Amino acid sequence: MGIGLKFEDSGSLLKWNDRLSDLVKIDNPEIKKVNGNIKICWHNKVILNGIMCHPIVEIPDYESIEETFFESISITTSGLDVETKAKCEEWKKHIIKFFGLPIETKIDKEENEEFYLWKIDESYVRLMTYYIHSLRCSLIISTEPQLSVE
């Protein structure tokens, strides 16, 4: 993961700091505008030693794909609280199994928020559960270690 994120199913590599215009040529992502953002979504990809997901790169629509660089990708699940919590726990156990314990943990029981941070090579993996209208679980892989809800 030092130079980017590998899609294990296709062998394709999304390289950190490549232009998004280069990434949209890899594995045929869906590109759409949603609520003032441009979302680039790859469907049914395998990452991090076996996690099947739909990773998304999202930027404000006033930014240009040609001039924006790849620094972060996310996976988010939401829905019924019990299902979302189970999916987040599954991701956490999987990451611990392959990459060890997180380097940082923050749990706020009053706000029902949990944040975990791993450093893998030169990349950071953040796993968080939080409420925005419903319980959400996000897995964010990036070049920065920020530990908070974005």
Image (tube, rainbow, N blue to C red):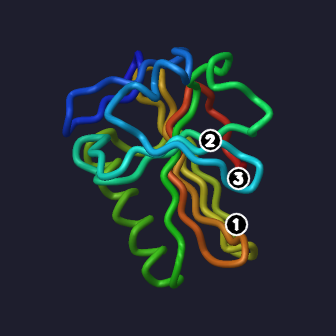
Residue 73 screen position, x and y as percent = 52, 38
Where residue 61 sits, quadrant-wise, is top right
Instruction: Say which element carries label 3.
Output: loop
Name the residue at 63% across, 25% down: 65
Residue 108 screen position, x and y as percent = 70, 66
State which tag comes first along the sequence, 3 or 2.
2
Q: Pointer 3: residues within 10 angstroms few (<14), some, or many (20+)?
A: some
Vertical side of 2 occupied by 149: above or below: below
Looking at the rendered structure, the kind of residue marked 1 is Asp
- The circle drawn on residue 58 is 2
Looking at the rendered structure, the kind of residue marked 2 is Glu
Instruction: Say which element carries label 2.
Output: strand
Where residue 143 sits, quadrant-wise, is top right
The reply to whether residue 51 is in sight is: yes
Q: Which residue is mark 1?
A: 108
- The circle drawn on residue 82 is none
Which quadrant of the figure contains the N terminus? Answer: top left
- With 62 as the anchor, is 29 left or right in this view? left
Q: Nearer the viewer, residue 5 or 69?
A: 69
Looking at the rendered structure, the kind of residue marked 3 is Val
Disc count in the image? 3
Instruction: Say which element carries label 1.
Output: strand
Vertical side of 73 occupied by 12: above or below: above
* Mark 2 vs mark 1: in front: 2
Q: CA distance from mark 1 to mark 3?
A: 13 Å
Q: Which residue is mark 3?
A: 149
Q: Nearer the viewer, residue 71 or 125?
A: 71
Q: CA distance from mark 2 to mark 1?
A: 27 Å
